[in-house]
Amino acid sequence: MKIQMEIHNLKQTDAIARAFSNIVKPPMVILLRGDLGSGKTTFVKSLVKYLGSDDVVTSPTFTLLNTYNGKFPIYHFDMYRLSSMEEAMAVGFEEYFDKKHLDGVCLVEWAENVEGLINDVDYIVEIEKIGDNERKFNILEAKK
Ligand SMILES: Nc1ncnc2c1ncn2[C@@H]1O[C@H](COP(=O)(O)OP(=O)(O)OP(=O)(O)O)[C@@H](O)[C@H]1O
Ligand SMILES: [Mg+2]
């Protein structure tokens, strides 16, 4: 599966999240890539809503992990403040990415900072900012 799309407003970001939500199920690991302010957390907000959760989605920049309850648990990570895989392991994150035990779905921002921690990725959502409200979305199935 591959979605490539240029969109022009928040409503369309929400629509992509709704379409994508149909293929999201446990145990899945999804990485969100894109510069600061590209819209990763904004996309997660919509996705969490369409995964049946009423929980308030906030950026886990400082908490590193937020858990939401939907049809299944949703683990929302932001690795921005981590600088190594060792640091992530020290906070006990590696067990979340073990597919044999994962009871929900992991959504990970800034996974680039913890290279080597996550081995089994299902999807990568790339967001590129091309204007104030315009974004280029590229959703791809990760190679196994
Ligand atoms: N079409 C769009 N899709 C997503 N976000 C948009 C769009 N248009 C404008 N925005 C705005 O861009 C900002 C994106 O911020 P957001 O926190 O989602 O980025 P982020 O990628 O999570 O950044 P960070 O790396 O700091 O976590 C928000 O203020 C959002 O309202
Ligand atoms: Mg964010």
Image (spheres, grey):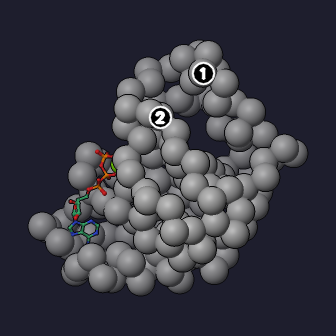
Q: Tell me: 128 left or right of 95.
A: left
Q: Which one is in front, 63 or 30?
A: 63
Q: In the displayed structure, would residue 11 be above or below residue 111?
A: below
Outermost residue toward the left in this view? 132
* Residue located 44% across and 24% down the image: 82
Inspect this view and state whether residue 114 appears.
yes
Establish whether ligand 2 lies closer than 8 Å to the Cβ of label 1: no
Q: Which one is in front, 114 or 89?
A: 89
Residue type pointed to by label 2: Leu
* Residue located 44% across and 79% down the image: 16
Q: Tell me: 71 left or right of 135.
A: right
Q: Residues within 10 Å of mark 1 (few under 14, many from 20)?
A: few
Q: Read off the residue under disc 1.
A: 91
Q: Position of residue 81 (x, y in %)?
A: 38, 27
* Residue located 74% across and 33% down the image: 95
* Residue located 68% across and 56% down the image: 73
Q: Position of residue 121 (x, y in %)?
A: 66, 50
Label 1 near label 2: C-beta < 8 Å? yes
Establish whether ligand 2 lies closer than 8 Å to the Cβ of label 2: no
* Residue 64, numbered circle: 2
Q: Position of residue 123 (x, y in %)?
A: 60, 60
Q: In the displayed structure, would residue 89 be above or below residue 64?
A: above
Quadrant hosting residue 101: top right
Sequence-wise, which precedes: disc 2 or disc 1? 2
